[in-house]
Amino acid sequence: MRMLPLLFLLLCQLAAAAPPEPARQAALLHLLKQDCGACHGMTRQGGLGPPLTAAALRDKPSDSLIATILYGRPGTAMPPWQRFLTESEVAWLIDTLRSEESHAPAPPR
């Protein structure tokens, strides 16, 4: 009987770590392009906000990036996204940005 709470906690952690469903992934990528791209540049090279490239994000702690996305940055143009995104979705977006540099559009010449 003692194992039941531990099993429940383990299952909760596994569920939180699972990637979003494919339809939600598509919606998140659309949000990344349209909403994040409005300030961070459509090619993610920066604009009003800093770049969102793999190189720019590589050394930044994930928990700091997650907090910035969820809660925004007071006194800046960075809004909070916690009404629209879960922590696990934000983590998935960060992982996607860090791993899909080769899929990003080339910067304009």
Image: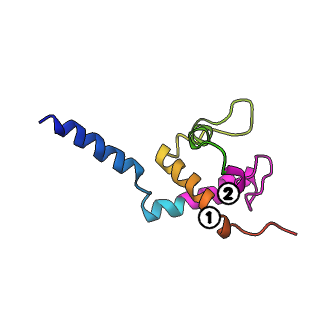
Closest to the observer, 56 or 92? 56
Query: Where's residue 49, x and y in %?
Result: 76, 46
Amino acid beneath label 1: Glu
Q: Report if residue 27 lies within the magenta region.
A: no
Amino acid beneath label 2: Ala
Q: Can residue 53 be seen in this view?
A: no
Local crowd size for mark 2, using a 10 Å CA cut-off: few (<14), some (14–19), many (≥20) = some
Magenta stretch: give its range. Answer: 28-57
Determine whether 97 is above or below 84 in the image: below
Query: Where's residue 51, x and y in %?
Result: 75, 52
Q: Is residue 93 visible?
A: yes
Does residue 35 appear left or right of residue 107 in this picture?
left
Number of numbered callouts drawn = 2
The answer to whether mark 1 and mark 2 are in CB contact below 8 A is: yes
Say which quadrant the C terminus sits in.
Answer: bottom right
The residue located at (55%, 57%) in the rendering is: 28
Closest to the observer, 13 or 49? 13
Q: Could you tell me which secondary element the residue under label 2 belongs to?
A: helix
The residue located at (66%, 47%) in the rendering is: 59
Image quarter of residue 100: bottom right
Q: By what rule are the colours in the image chosen?
A: rainbow
> Residue 63 bears which disc, if any?
none
The residue located at (67%, 50%) in the rendering is: 57
Query: Which residue matches tag 1?
Result: 100
Query: Where's residue 65, x and y in %?
Result: 61, 42
How far apart are the alpha carbons under marks 1 and 2?
A: 7 Å
Query: Which residue matches tag 2?
Result: 54
